[in-house]
Image: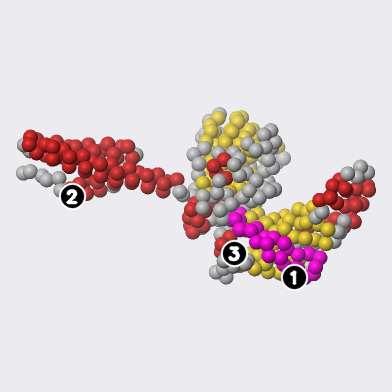
Amino acid sequence: MRRRLTKQRVKKILQRDIEVPVIVTEQMAAALHTINAEYDEEENRREIAHYNKVHRFKQQVAMVALICIVGLGATATAIEARRWNEKAAKVWNADETLQNKTLEQNIAQMPDISVTDAGVTVSVAQIVTDGLAERVLFKVEVPKDVEVREKGQHLEFGTYTLTSSGNTGETLGVNGGAFKPWLTEENVYYFDADIQLQKENALQGQSLTYTFCNLCEYVKGESDTLVEGRWQLKIPAEVQEYAMSMTKTYTKSLDLGSNDVHIDEVILSPMEINATMSYHGRILEESKKYDDRYWEFLPCVSKIVMKDGTEIPVEKGFTVHDYKMANEKDAEAVEAIKDPAKQMKQYREYEDWTVTANLDLLQTVQDIEDESIGLIDPDEVQAVVFTYGGKEYSYTIPKSN
């Protein structure tokens, strides 16, 4: 009995291909082979007079199959690329909603970057960058014959450096980096590295190169080399293209109980809260009184209030402070003083400072799970609460126009 190549049959053929998760080219070849086989059977039973008509229909169906399958493959590829690494989501406390938004805004990426030396493979599991900071989770795969104790609690790299294409020959400061033992799998370990930028969006247009040397264990004050090797991974500049897409800057001023201290600017990003404030007073004298515990006398972030009413507490001491003389000419004049004693006297007597308070939302202790605040969505922040002089002051985020 003659079997017609109806629309329903074509649909079944395409559905059969869709259900098999193979590479796009293989899907294409299989689909075309199936369609051609159907038509070979058809053509053997048709008269020559009908050949041209059938051949044209065959080409049309093949083209439809090709478009559908290529489209399917492209969709599958896009889905594969636009996802989060499970370990990264866990260590940085990113829920599904935030994962999706960071992917949409192109600040979270999983570039295919890896290098192998001495049997150890180091690869990029996840990158998040927001213009104020960058976080990279590295996956480290170790041969089975390398004995690593206590799930990698003592693992470290002998040395690691970070350079950028915009700072040729200079090493960028890496504020933190540690293995996360609670992410450990069999012979697989994870190293979490972060960069705190001194200048907003400082990495724009720059590639970064991480260089790790020797895999070691540090136990009882001594470092024991497990594997001698060198692993260098280059992060392309394209990663930085949309770094600022979720970062928000607010210039509303807030007095903190007096005219001596007030907040001038707050920047919110998924990984950081950065506040710039004016401080009128002898900051070095105060620092000496509190034995350099700046969080005891300078404003600190104590709470983040979200629009849904959730309050996220911040531990005391997590806010990091930096300060400089507010007037550049004054700073240059003091820097020019050659006598160290006289120079220090000028610093101690100076009373007009610009203070930066920075909160890293992903601060963690190496072996404690879920210890960090985690990533936030700046669009969902209602207020940032600062503590100063034993009182709380709420910096309410202005509504978008």
Quarter of the image with the N terminus in it:
top left
Q: Tell me which amino acid carries mark 3.
A: Val
Location of mark 2 (residue): 7
Left or right for 336, reference 303: right
The span from disc 3 to disc 2 (Cα, nearest Å) is 53 Å
Quarter of the image with the C terminus in it:
bottom right
Q: Is residue 141 visible?
A: no
Residue stretch in magenta? 247-271
Left or right for 313, reference 22: right
Location of mark 3 (residue): 381
Residue depicted at 71% across the width and 65% down the height: 253
Q: Position of residue 163 (x, y in %)?
A: 65, 37
**Above or below — where is 3 with respect to 226?**
below
Q: Of circles 3 and 2, which is in front?
A: 2
Q: Tell me which amino acid carries mark 2.
A: Lys
Location of mark 1 (residue): 391
Q: Of circles 1 and 3, which is in front?
A: 3
Q: Position of residue 242 (x, y in %)?
A: 55, 49
- Label the magenta part by its dominant secondary structure: strand
Left or right for 82, reference 351: left
Mark number displayed over residue 349: none
| Within-10-Å neighbours for mark 2: few <14, some 14–19, many 20+ | few
The span from disc 2 to disc 1 (Cα, nearest Å) is 74 Å
The span from disc 1 to disc 3 (Cα, nearest Å) is 21 Å
Q: Residue 65 or 333: which is nearer the viewer?
A: 333
User: What secondary structure is found at the residue carrying circle 2?
Assistant: helix
